Image: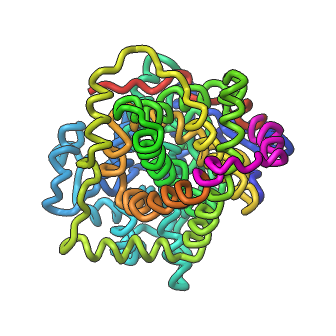
Amino acid sequence: MDVTFKSNVFEIEVITLADTQEMIVRGGRDKFPLLTKAFDGINQIGVIGWGSQGPAQAQNLRDSLEGTDIKVKIGLRPGSASMASAREAGFAEENGTLGEMYEVVAESDMVLLLISDAAQIDHFEKVFATMKDGATLGLSHGFLLGHLESIGRYFPENINVVGVCPKGMGPSVRRLYVQGKEINGAGINTSFAVEQDINGKATDHALGWAVGVGAPYVFMTTLGNEYRSDIFGERGILLGAVHGIVEALYRRFVMQEGMDEEQAFTDSVENVTGPLSRTISHDGILAVYEQLDADGKTIFEKIYSHAYRPALEILLEIYDEVSSGNEIRSVYMAGNRFDRFPMGKIDGTRMWQVGEEVRAKRTDAMPKINPFTAGLYCATMMAQIDLLIERGHCLSEVANESVIEAVDSLNPYMHFKGVAFMVDNCSTTARLGSRKWAPRFDYNIQQQAFVDYDAGKPVDAELITAFKSHKVHNALAVCATMRPSVDISLTE
C-alpha cells in the first residue's frame, strides 16, 4: 500500500516503523493558524449528523477555526431530537450554524457526512445529487465505500472524497481536545485517506480536518483499507473479542476455579480494562509479559500458545465477511428490523451486576495483573495484528486499529462505565458486531483454548518466540512517542 503524500500546508515527517517507513503529519494547537490555508476554497463546513462523532468533530472544528471566516454548520433532519442537543452545544438557527440537513449539504463547500452507517446507505444518492460541483465530501468511516463497492457504484466525478477517521469514539475525541486546551497535543490519533481528488486540494482539506479535530498525529491509509480494518477491528479486539474474552474468563474463574464473583470480575474485566491497558498504553504489549514473575510467565506462555489459533480462526472469518461486503449488508438489513425488534441490553446478567458493585468499591490502586487473563488477551491482540499485516495494512494502521484505539480510547471508557455499557451504547454497527461475534470468541476460547490448557498440551515454542521478537513492538515504541500528551480524563 502506497502511504506517500504531499501537502502544500503542513510539514510531513517520515517515521520508521520496524521494517517500513511511513509519512505522518503532527497535529497540535500550534498548527491551528495553518487551517485557513489548508481549507482553501472552503467558506462553510457542513457537519451532517449528531451521533457519536458529529458533536465532537463539529465542536472541535468550530473551536479550532474561531476567529477565521470559515463557518461550521450543523445539518439535521427536520424535527430531529438532536436539535436540542446541538443548540445546547452552541449551534443555532439564529446565527446560521444550525439548519436542515439538505440545505446545509447544498450550501457547504465541505460536507462531513457523520450520520449512521445505515442512514448513509439510505441518503447517499440525494446527498451526492445535492452537493456543489467541486465540493469535498468527508467521511469518518469507509462504510459507504464498502456499500458502493458491493452494489457496483462509486462516488460522483464532480466532488472530492476524503476520509478522516479518529481512532476512538466521539466522546474521546472531544474530551481529549478539551484537555488539550491546557496541554498542547492532547487528542485522538487519526488516519486520513484521499479517495478522489478533482482539484488538487483534497489532501490538504483532509489534513486540515484531521488537525482541526485535534489529532496528535495523522497517518495515511486508503478508504478501502480503513473500512476493512475498522469494521473488522471493532468486531475483534476493540469490542467483540474483548466482550467474548471476559465472559469466558469470568465463568471459568467462578465455576472452575472457585473464585468469588467480585474477584472473578476483577481478574477478568478489571484486569483487561485497567492494568493491562495501562501497561500496553505506556510500555507496549511485550512489557505485560516481561513484568510478570517466573510463574506468571509460564502461565502466560501456556494460555497464549493455546489461545492464539482459536482467536485467529474467528478473526479470519470476520475479515473475510467484512471484505466480501456480507457484514455491511448484515448491518443494513438489521437496521430495517429495528422498528419491530429493537436491540435489547446485555447489562442485566449477574456478571455485569457484579461489575457495578466492583466499580463502586474501587480504590486508586490498580489490581495485580492476572497472567492467565494477560496471555489470553495478548494472544487475541497479536492474532489480530498478524492478520492485518498479512492482508497488507500499513503498520501505523495496524498499531492504531489493534492496540492504540483499544488501550487509549475504548478500554478506558469500558473501565469507567463497564464493557456492557460500551456494548449497549456504541454505534449500531459496532453494537451489532459485538453481539454477533463475541459469542464466537467465547465459544472458541472455551472449547479449544481452555481445553488444551487444562489438558496440559505443550507450549508452542515457535509461537512464543515469534511473539517476543515481533516487529509490532518496535512500531508501538515509535507510536508511543506520538501518543496523546495526557491520558484521557473520565468523570461523571
Residue 321 in sight here: yes
The picture places residue 272, in percent across and down from the top left corner, at 50, 35
The picture places residue 220, in percent across and down from the top left corner, at 67, 50
Asked if the magenta segment contains residue 328, the reply would be no
Asked if the magenta segment contains residue 457, the reply would be yes
In the image, residue 284 above or below residue 349: above
Question: What residue is shown at x 40% (from left), y 14% (from top)?
Answer: 364
In the image, residue 189 above or below residue 363: below
Question: In the picture provided, is 424 more to the left or to the right than 440?
Answer: left
Colour style of the rendered protein structure: rainbow
In the image, residue 19 above or below residue 184: below
Residue 246 in sight here: no
Magenta span covers which residues? 450-473
Q: Nearer the viewer, residue 213 or 203?
A: 213
Question: What residue is shown at x 60% (from left), y 66% (from top)?
Answer: 319
Question: What residue is shown at x 58% (from left), y 63% (from top)?
Answer: 314
Q: Report the number of discs.
A: 0
The picture places residue 160, in percent across and down from the top left corner, at 55, 64
